[in-house]
Amino acid sequence: MGKADGPQMDQNEVDALLAAMQTGALPSDAAPSASPAAAPPEPEATGVVAYDFRHPLRLSKERLRAFELVHQVFARNAAATLTGQFLAHIELRLESTRQLTFADFLCSLPSPTCCLLLSRPALPGTVVLELNPTIAFPVIVHLLGRGRTPSPIPERPLTETEWSVLRTLADPLVRELEAAWATVKPVQLRIVSQESTPQLLAVAQPGEPVVLLSFVLAVEDNSGPVNLCIPHSIVEPFLAELAERGVTGAPRREAREAPSVSIREALLHVPITLAGVLAEMTLTAKDVLELAPEDRLETGRGKEAKIMLVAEGRPIFRGDLATVRRKRAIRITGKL
């Protein structure tokens, strides 16, 4: 036999190895190595990054951040507009921005819920605006002036009347979304349909990537989530336009009305009750109960006395009785 390559073990080394195996100092399944130099070098550990091919991240963090900033501006402007319109304290803040598939978005929604589909003829996809019932029902109760929201929140689809009332909130949100997008690219959105069951939203393939913007809407003491699901087919051209303009921060609306101006414009359309007071007197409850037809009450005012005009209980004008087109009227003669 030819001589083996590498250094050989002598008899003393072999006896020491067998003794160690018998006493347990060396595991019996350990393979003795002829020489440390003869063992092949182990490969160095390399960093491994997990990647889910079912949910690819198609947008970089930088581009997603630019998209997020646009909708932070939308949230601030929408809150100011709704506060002026509803005369109530309203907040809308962006909580998170995620990339996921349309199927995952549907699985995250409760059933029933309140989904509004936004589109336009030239838009390559449909945007889903979802208002969670935990905020949709309190908004409806607030707009109807019916007092406190029922607890617990009803687990049922909205009626047609409730959908119509909810549009009072949804329409300003859509207009503010248009305004935010218009800082990058003009677009006209409109509500094309509504749906209460998420599983019936056949607006995209289950595996289509989308960007989900999650907001929290607070109206007085009630709050709840509002989700904006935008297909990647819409997001990608939008971000390309941002890149062409070199926009890295939040775009500004060039001619944005101050919140005080918006509130003043909204207040001009609030109805106010205006009453004409001919005379005032104090009677006891007994006197009122004893009144009968043909009775006359002494006011202490002459027939030339002025009439006082009162708006919501506050005197503001004085005037005289007049006639206009055979109807009684009040002619304002001065301000109080």
Image (tube, rainbow, N blue to C red):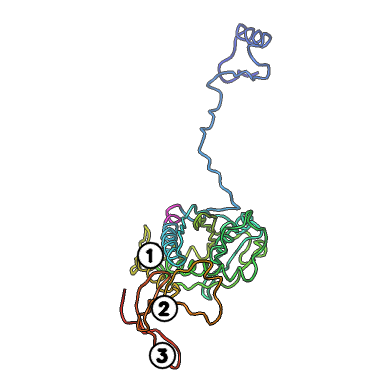
Q: CA distance from mark 1 to mark 3?
A: 68 Å
- Which circle marks residue 72 in the picture? none
Residues rendered magenta in the picture: 61-65
- The residue tagged 2 is 278
Asked if disc 2 and disc 3 are in contact, CB closer than 8 Å, the reply is no
Q: Earlier in the sequence, mark 1 or mark 3?
A: 1
In the image, taking residue 57 as reference, residue 28 lies left or right, namely right
Image point (68%, 19%), residue name: 29
Q: Residues within 10 Å of mark 2 (few under 14, many from 20)?
A: some
Overall secondary structure of the magenta section: helix
Which structural element holds mark 2? loop
Asked if disc 1 and disc 3 are in contact, CB closer than 8 Å, the reply is no
Residue type (three-letter) at the residue carrying disc 1:
Glu
- The residue tagged 3 is 323
Q: CA distance from mark 1 to mark 2?
A: 69 Å
Residue 225 placement (x, y as % from top left):
54, 55
Front one among 28 and 150: 150
Residue type (three-letter) at the residue carrying disc 3:
Thr
- Which circle marks residue 244 in the picture? 1
Q: In the image, which is nearer the foreground, mark 1 or mark 3? A: 3
Which structural element holds mark 1? helix
